[in-house]
Amino acid sequence: MSELLSYMQRHTDEIVALVRLLAEHESPTAHDPAEKAASDHLATYLEGMLTGYGAEVERLPQAVRGDHLVARWGQGERPTLILAHYDTVWPLGTLNSMPVRVVDDQLRGPGVYDMKGGFVLGLMAVRCLREMVRLHGPVTFLINSDEEVGSLTSRSLIESEARRSQAALVLEPAQPPNAALKTSRKGVGRFHLKVIGQPGHSGWVAEYGVSAVEEMARQVVDLYGLADHGRGTTINVGVMQGGTRANVIAAEAVADIDLRVTNKAEGERMTEAILNRQPFNPGAKIEVSGGLNRPPMERTPGTVALFEAAQRVGESLGLAITESSSGGGSDGNFTSAIGVPTLDGLGVVGGGAHGHDEHLLVSQLAARAALVAGVLEAVTSGRVGLP
C-alpha cells in the first residue's frame, strides 16, 4: 500500500486546494431559490469534474433543493457504492464571517469537514486506482444535496443504488478523538406532538378550562421517562411552545421530539409508544405525527468484514484503525438497513462539525485518502469476503 500513500502525499497540495475550492462554493441545503441556485452551481462544477475524471454522470434535477449526481466508472453487476453529500448546514453568506483558511495544520471553513473533504478523498481514491489500473470492478459514486435535512428526496435513490451494489462506503468524517471508522449508528426519529385544550379565563381554570400547556408538561415528563440509556435509547423534546397570554388558559401547545435508537426492534417499540400517546386530562386532545426518518445502522457481519479489511489496509499504511458507534445518522443508515454491508467514517480527520471551529487536519489527508483507495481496491477485487 506504500504506493497509494506516496501518490496521495504527492497530491496533498492538490487535495487541499480542491477542498478549499469546494468549500468556497457555498451549498446550503436549500430553503429558498437563492440557496438552490448556489447548490446547483456547485453541482454543475462537480458534474464537470467527475466527467473529467472519466465517469459517466447522471444528474437528477430537484424542484426545491440542489440536484443529485450519480457518477459511474465501469460496467457490470454488483458495483461498489460510494456515498457523499455536498450540502452543508451553513446559510449563504457564511464565508463573510467564516472564510476558508489554513491555520497551522487545520484547514478551516464551512463544510470542509462535513463533508466536502470526504468527497475529495473519494474522488482522489478513484482517480489514483484508475491511473494505477487497480480499480478491479465497477464503482458508483452518489453525491446528494439534502443529507443534512434527512435525505428527503434522495433516500429512494440511495436505496435503489444500494440494492444493486455489493457494499457501501460512506465518506462522512472519521469519529473523534481517535479517527475511528463507524460500524454502527443510531436510528433517528422525528415527531411532532400537538395538544388541544379548552381556553378560558385563568381565574376559572379549575371549573371550566383545560390547559394545553399543563397537559403538554405532563406529556413531556412522561416522554423522557421512556428513555432507556442501557439500550442506548434517548429522547429529547427540543422545541416546545404553547399559550397566548398569562391570564388565558392555553388552548394549544406543540412540541418537536427527537428519538435515537440502536436497533430496529427498539425503534418500532418507541415509535408505537410515541405515536399512541393518550391525554392525562380526558378533556384534552392529542395529535402526534412523524416516525423514524433514518433506520438504525447495525453492526452486521458484512460491516465487520469491511472494517477488518480497513484494518488490514490501515496496518500497511501505519495507521491503527479502530471502530466506533455514532449517535448521529447518515446515509449509511439507509444502505445498512436494507442489508448492504456498509462502512462509515471513511472521510477526513478533524472536528467541529456544524460549529464555527469546523476543520480538518491537513497532515492526515494523504493517509486517509490512501485508506479509502486501499479499501476500495480490496472490495472491487473481491478480497474482502463479503457475506
Image (cartoon, rainbow, N blue to C red):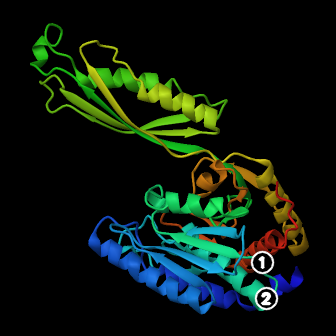
**Residue at the spot of label 1:** 370
Q: Which residue is at a point 21% across and 29% down the rendered structure image?
A: 252
Towards the viewer: 359 or 387: 387
Name the residue beneath numbered marker 2: 7
Residue 373 as seen in the image, left or right of residue 315: left
Q: Is residue 229 visible in the rendered structure shown here? A: yes
Residue 233 visible in the current orientation: no
Most distant residue in the left direction: 201
Q: Position of residue 28 (x, y in %)?
A: 40, 69
**Quadrant of res 53:** bottom right
Residue for point 72% across, 80% down: 125
Mark 1, secondary structure of its residue: helix
- At label 1, which amino acid type do we have? Ala
- Label whose residue precedes the other's in the sequence (2 or 1): 2
- Other residues around mark 2 within 10 Å, as few (<14) / some (14–19) / many (≥20): some
327 relative to 69, above or below: above
The secondary element bearing badge 2 is classed as: helix
Q: Is residue 33 above or below residue 132?
A: above
Q: Nearer the viewer, residue 146 or 238?
A: 146
**Which circle marks residue 273 in the picture?**
none
157 relative position to 310: left or right: left
> Residues at badges 2 and 1 in contact (C-beta under 8 Å)?
yes
136 horizontally vs 267: left or right: right
